[in-house]
Amino acid sequence: DAFAEDQGRYVVTFPWSDRESWAAFEADAGEAGVVVSWIGSTGGNSIDWTDGEDTPVANVPLTDLRAAHKSFFKNWMEA
């Protein structure tokens, strides 16, 4: 699962143009025995998930994510 963030799974970000930093992070993580995966990119008005950096899997507008975030507890408590 790409998103099951807990004490053992985190989402980190790097600027798309800074591939050197990602490569260094990936190497350091590998040396420490930590598995890292590139799951997509952010920017503009959406979050895009990719499969292996090339194949688009999903595109979610930030407006949809904001609405879901802001309404979750309200909807849950009123249900």
Image (spheres, rainbow, N blue to C red):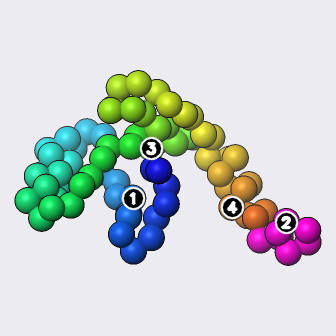
Cα separation between marks 4 and 3: 17 Å
Tell me which residue sits at (72%, 56%) in the image: 68
Is residue 75 highlighted in magenta? yes
Dominant secondary-structure state across the stretch colored magenta? helix
Q: Which residue is mark 1?
A: 11
Point out the frontmost of discs 2 and 3. 2
Q: Which residue is mark 2?
A: 75
Which is more N-terminal, label 4 or label 1? 1
Q: Is residue 38 left or right of residue 35?
A: right
Q: Which residue is mark 4?
A: 69
Classify 10 Å Cα crowding around label 1: few (below 14), some (14-19), many (20 and above): few
Classify 10 Å Cα crowding around label 3: few (below 14), some (14-19), many (20 and above): some
Cα separation between marks 3 and 1: 12 Å
Cα separation between marks 2 and 1: 26 Å
Which is more N-terminal, label 1 or label 2? 1
Q: Specify start and end residues of the magenta stretch as a single range.
A: 73-79
Q: Are marks 3 and 1 in contact (CB under 8 Å)?
A: no
Q: Quadrant of residue 35?
A: bottom left
Q: Are marks 2 and 3 in contact (CB under 8 Å)?
A: no
Q: Which residue is mark 3?
A: 42
Tell me which residue sits at (56%, 34%) in the image: 59
Which is more N-terminal, label 2 or label 4? 4
Three-letter code, disc 4: His
Tell me which residue sits at (52%, 42%) in the image: 47
* Rendered position, 9 above or below 60: below
Q: Is residue 31 left or right of residue 78?
A: left
Cα separation between marks 4 and 2: 11 Å
